[in-house]
Image: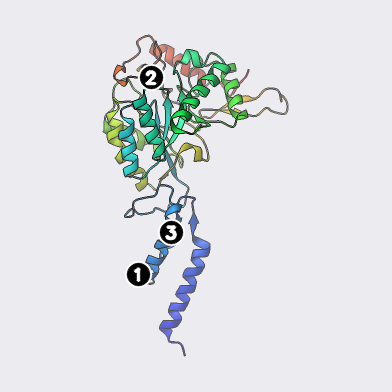
Amino acid sequence: MLSLQKISFILTSLFFSASLLSGCQNTGRHVVAPVFSVSSTVSQTSSEAIPESTSKDNLPSDAELVSTGTDKVAYLTFDDGPTEMTPQIVAVLKQYQVKATFFVVYKNSQKLESYMKLASDEGNEIAAHSYCHNYKQIYRNVSSFMEDFEKVNQWIESVTGHRTNQLRFPGGSSIGRKYLSKPVLNGILSTLHDKDMTHHDWNVSSGDASSKAQSKEKILENIKNEALKFDEPVILMHDVERNQGTLEALPEIIEWLRSQGYSFDTVSNIKHPAQHRSYSPPTETDSSRPSVSENFSVPLPPTSSEVLSEVSSAESFPPVQSDSTSSEAIEASSDISSAAISSDMSNVSEINQIER
C-alpha cells in the first residue's frame, strides 16, 4: 500500500508536468517554466532544460531570466558611425552579450571600415543611413534617395559581405517639408514598400543629438523617462566620438532595461517598426494613389533651435555643408532659426494623409 508521502510526491509530479505543458511562456527569447519548491532537484532540472539558443541575448550564466508575461524587446540603435567610438560600443555590447543596430554613413577610411566589420562580425546589425548625408541632395527626388541608399548598401556589402533592406532616413521620416516634400516622401515610401525595404525611426531618444554633449546622467534620464511606455522601445543614440556620455551610460542602460524585463534584438526582427510616417496602400476609391500615414502613437521629436552639424535626427536639422568624417568638427549650425524649425515641425501635425 502506498504511503501518504509517496502519493503526495506522485500528485505533485503530475501537477508539475501538466503545468509545464500548459503554463510555459515561449516568448521567442526565453522559455520560462513555473517554479515549484518540490525539491532542489526538480528546480535545477527545469532551469537546466532551457536551451541556451532560446535566449536571444545569450544572457550571462549568472543572470536571471525575467518573465513579464509580455513580449518586451528593446532595440538599441546607433546612427552616423563608424567612428573611433564604434569599437568601444561593440566592446560594451559584447561584454553584456547584447546585439544592437548601427545605421551607418559612408566613410572613406579603411580603419573605420574595419570597425564596421568588427561590429558586424560580433553579430550586430549593419543597416543603411546614408552615403552622402546631404539632405538637399538626398531628398531632391525619389531617384536621388534610392541612389544614395544603393551606394551606401554597396559599401556595406563590400565591407561586411552582407546587404541590408533596413534603413533610417537621414533626419528621420518626420523631417520637415523644407527638405522633404510630400510628393517625394510619398514616392520614397511607396518605392521602399515595393522593394520590401523597411525604414526605422525611433520612439525613445537619448537626446545625444543636441548641440552640447550630454552627460551620462542626462542620457540615462532621457531614456528612462520614455522607454517603459513601449514594449518595443527603439532607442536613438549616436555613434559620434564626442558622445562620451552615451558610451559611459550604455552599461547602465542595458542593466536597467534588463531589470525592467526587456531582452534585446536588432531591428530586422522587430514586430512593429517605429515609423513617424509610414506607407498606406491605395484605397478602393483611389487605387492609383498610395498615401502616407502619420503615426501619432510614435512621439515626434521636439522642436529645437539647437542643432548639430554632424548628428542626424529629426531633432537636429542639416548643416550648411555636407557632413565631414571627423566627429571633432561638431558644432551648432547657425543659419537655422528657431522660428524656421517651429514652422517646419508644425507642418507635421497638419497632415493626416500626404497626397502626391
Q: Earlier in the sequence, mark 2 or mark 3?
A: 3
Which of these two is toward me, 290 or 83? 83
Q: Quarter-wise, where is residue 77 in the image? A: top left
The picture places residue 120, in percent across and down from the top left corner, at 41, 36
Q: Which residue is mark 3?
A: 50
Residue contact between numbered discs 2 and 1, judged by CB atoms under 8 Å: no
Amino acid carrying label 2: it is: Ser
The answer to whether residue 25 is above or below residue 171 is below
Q: Which residue is mark 2?
A: 304
The image's mark for residue 40 is: 1
The picture places residue 181, in percent across and down from the top left corner, at 55, 15
Q: CA distance from mark 3 to mark 1?
A: 16 Å
Q: CA distance from mark 2 to mark 1?
A: 58 Å
Q: Visible in this render: residue 205?
A: no
Which of these two is toward me, 220 or 191? 191
Amino acid carrying label 1: it is: Ser
Task: State the SS at label 1.
Answer: helix
Image quarter where the C terminus lies is top right
